[in-house]
Amino acid sequence: MDLLPYIFLVGLVFITFFILLSILGYSIFFLIKIRFIKEKEDNKRIYRTLSFLEQLFISFGIGLSVYISICYVLDLFQAFNFYTAYLSVIIYDSTFLGYLIFSNKEKLRKEYKISLFKEQCKEYFSNKNNLICLGSLILIIVISTIIQLAIINDSDSLIYTDPYKIYQGTFYLIDNGHIDYKFLDYNYPSGHIFFTAGVLLIYPDYIFGYYYFKVISLYILSLYIIIAYVIIRKLFKKNYLVFLSLLFILISRYFIARTILYIPSSLASVLLIISLILIIKKLPDYIMGIFLAALYLIHPLTAFYFIFVLVCFYIFKFSINFRNKELIIKQFSSIILLIILSLIFLIPYFLSIYFVYGDTFLDFLEHFIERFTNFEDALSYKIYKDFRNYVLDLVYPLEFVELVVDDKLLDVFDEFFRNSIFLFFIFSIMGLFIFIIP
């Protein structure tokens, strides 16, 4: 099976859609920045410290959130198609870019000329630490790509049943203009399917769609690693800590296994790690409301885990600043705005519950609670355990060292590899509290 042409084409359509959503998100982030700078003079300094990549990733997160909410509106009218969900984004992005260029002619002429770009590149690559860290990033991405290709080529089929279900739901949406209401109930939001269908609208071919599901993890995981790299460079100055942090992601077998499957949690993980940039850069809390809405519409479980972390974060933040009444009032107001923004972006989803499924909000809460009470029983299914062990054995097989390493020591390392994803989230959560001091 010759995957190389499909790897290139999948990358092309994915990067194109990534850019479209980033421009869409930047148009909103642009307005937020203007308001943010006007609030306080010191905020101008915070904005200027945002790198190009940080602004790009934040814009993508906002654009993804806006796009999913728009798709729910289109779904209500059964009007999801290339013209409404793809071409309209291109037209909007082109209009916004035209406005930026027309309104900043002088600035563009002075600051974005080729000589300045060359000077910035020279300054970056003349720094030894930058080269070492960049080399570490490239090495980790290359290793992860080699591992994924070995797993992808293990069989012609997709791994497990979930990707096939998402494939079915994606092309039903593309072919009919709305999601399959019998196939998906509202307790399993369709944000992931809307995103995938959006990417494939430019080339809605069934065979290409199959290969998209098979190789898209190469780009999703690479994107996750690059975002993590941007954050890690802000946290650590030592080169070996940067490398070890990236390596820690690479040995997270369970996380990588789920990413290869291309299930909703893989896209949600990307959105979640982008949201950490908002905290690290001390951007307004209400921006998080946009991200939380999209997290829920993509993968509710990830959203509620993150909400729990944020609640702990803000409680701790209030406790250490309880004497500063001005800061407490400002923080509380920002959290209220965060909640309002989340609800605004969830309105199309709640409308679909009422108009499509005929349920009320109380019905939604009842089904939601029931789903979580049955979650533990679902994990005990034998087919799930067999599948989990199969995928984990595909990632970083340890057979080649069994003849050299003692069995007990091997079990220790294997257990660490399996559970390192939990350690990663623990350290990430603990790391949030570093940035509480205003």
Image (tube, rainbow, N blue to C red):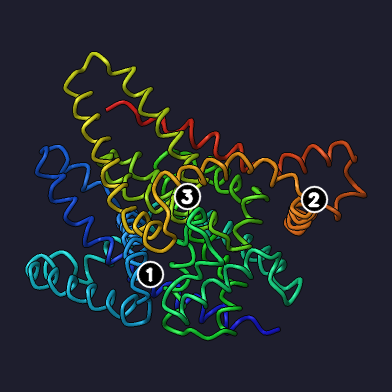
Looking at the image, is mark 1 or mark 2 nearer the viewer?
Answer: 1
Neighbour class for label 1 at 10 Å: few (<14), some, many (≥20)? many
Q: Nearer the viewer, residue 178 or 165?
A: 178
Find numbered disc 3 in the image and state the secondary structure of the residue it sits on.
helix
Neighbour class for label 3 at 10 Å: few (<14), some, many (≥20)? many
Q: Position of residue 357 (x, y in %)?
A: 44, 60
Q: Is residue 270 above or below residue 192?
A: above
Looking at the image, is mark 2 or mark 3 nearer the viewer?
Answer: 2
Mark 2 → mark 3, Cα distance in angstroms:
34 Å
Q: Position of residue 138 (x, y in %)?
A: 53, 60
- Give the numbered dot on residue 228: 3
The answer to the question of whether label 1 and label 2 lie on touching residues, with beta carbons closer than 8 A, is no
The residue wearing badge 1 is 75
Instruction: Name the image quarter holding residue 416.
Output: top right
Find numbered disc 1 in the image and state the secondary structure of the residue it sits on.
helix
Residue shown at the point (31%, 60%) measured from the top left? 66
Q: Position of residue 270 (x, y in %)?
A: 47, 54
Give the quadrant of the N terminus: bottom right
Residue shown at the point (9%, 44%) measured from the top left? 38
Task: Report whether residue 291 is seen.
Answer: yes
Specify which label sits upstream in the sequence, 1 or 3. 1
Q: Nearer the viewer, residue 171 or 426?
A: 171
Residue shown at the point (22%, 58%) measured from the top left? 28
- Give the numbered dot on residue 392: none
Specify which label sits upstream in the sequence, 2 or 3. 3
The residue wearing badge 2 is 382
The reply, left or right, for residue 264 in relation to residue 163 is left
Instruction: Name the image quarter holding residue 438.
Output: top left
Specify which label sits upstream in the sequence, 1 or 2. 1
Find numbered disc 2 in the image and state the secondary structure of the residue it sits on.
helix
